[in-house]
Image (cartoon, helix red, strand yellow):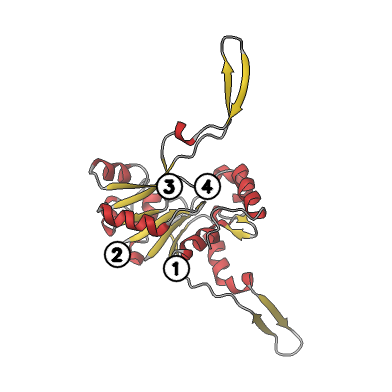
Amino acid sequence: MKVVILAGGLGTRISEESHLRPKPMIEIGGFPILWHIMKIYSHYGFNEFVVCCGYKGYMIKEYFAQYYLHCSDVTFDFSAENRMTIHNNIAEPWKVTLVDTGLHAQTGCRIKRVQKYIGNETFMMTYGDGVSNVDLQALLRCHRNSGKVVTLTAIQPGGRFGVLQLDHATGTVDGFKEKAKEDGGWISAGFMVMEPEVFSYVKNEEPCVFEREPLERLSREGKLGAYEHTDFWQCMDTQRDKGMLEHLWGSGIAPWKVW
């Protein structure tokens, strides 16, 4: 089963990094977040990827073109034959198709433009900036049992800020508590499963934002399902998010490292 990864956006909210490279190539622990996402899928047996490139997409192509060099020891022998030898090369079981889906394309158009690489089969789709420990096999079973066209992973992110416990009568702060996940609504975390029928809901003309008209129409028609995930999920939207993910990885407790 193929996995489509949306990796073409400008990443304007993390411009400190994205002015140099595409957002999915921003590193966590020395590896692009795109690599982390692919490792999650690979752990569950999904090894064929279609990456929707756009902004600075050539950097994604160059990364995979030189993947052995990034992950292996190498000797350059300039003394005689100008030879390169790769030692202990790491072979991922991946097939990766990189598609230029346009510099400013919206998400719906990007999905439509990789249709020919998907064919008439069920596929997965996610965003190139979010990691999770979602059980992808359980997600797939949920989708198949539901009979929906699209099943998305739903999460409750909670709040970014702690909540004050106030005694309003005296104006006293009695304590602090974390904002509970249950206090907020459910949102889509990506990690979707889709039937090829979804291509009839998206168009190749701008603007086509997949999260708006296509998903809203599927919802109205009762064809959009949700798999509830109550454990870890985090997107890398800002420099603060990146710092938090770096801390988790560096501490050896990264919840998304399921491999």
Left/right of residue 55 with respect to residue 211 in the rendered view: right
Dot 3 falls on a residue whose secondary structure is loop
Mark 3 or 4, closer to the camera: 3
Q: Which residue is mark 1?
A: 47
For badge 4, the amino acid type reads: Cys
Tell me the CA gap for discs 3 and 4: 15 Å
Tell me the CA gap for discs 2 and 3: 25 Å
Which of marks 4 and 3 precedes in the sequence? 3
For badge 3, the amino acid type reads: His
Tell me the CA gap for discs 2 and 4: 28 Å
For badge 2, the amino acid type reads: Glu
Which of marks 3 and 2 precedes in the sequence? 2
Left/right of residue 76 with respect to residue 110 in the rendered view: right
Splitting the image into 4 quarters, where does residue 110 fall?
Answer: bottom left
CB atoms of marks 2 and 4 within 8 Å: no
Q: Which residue is mark 3?
A: 229
Indicate the position of residue 61 as horizontal and vertical percent values.
53, 66
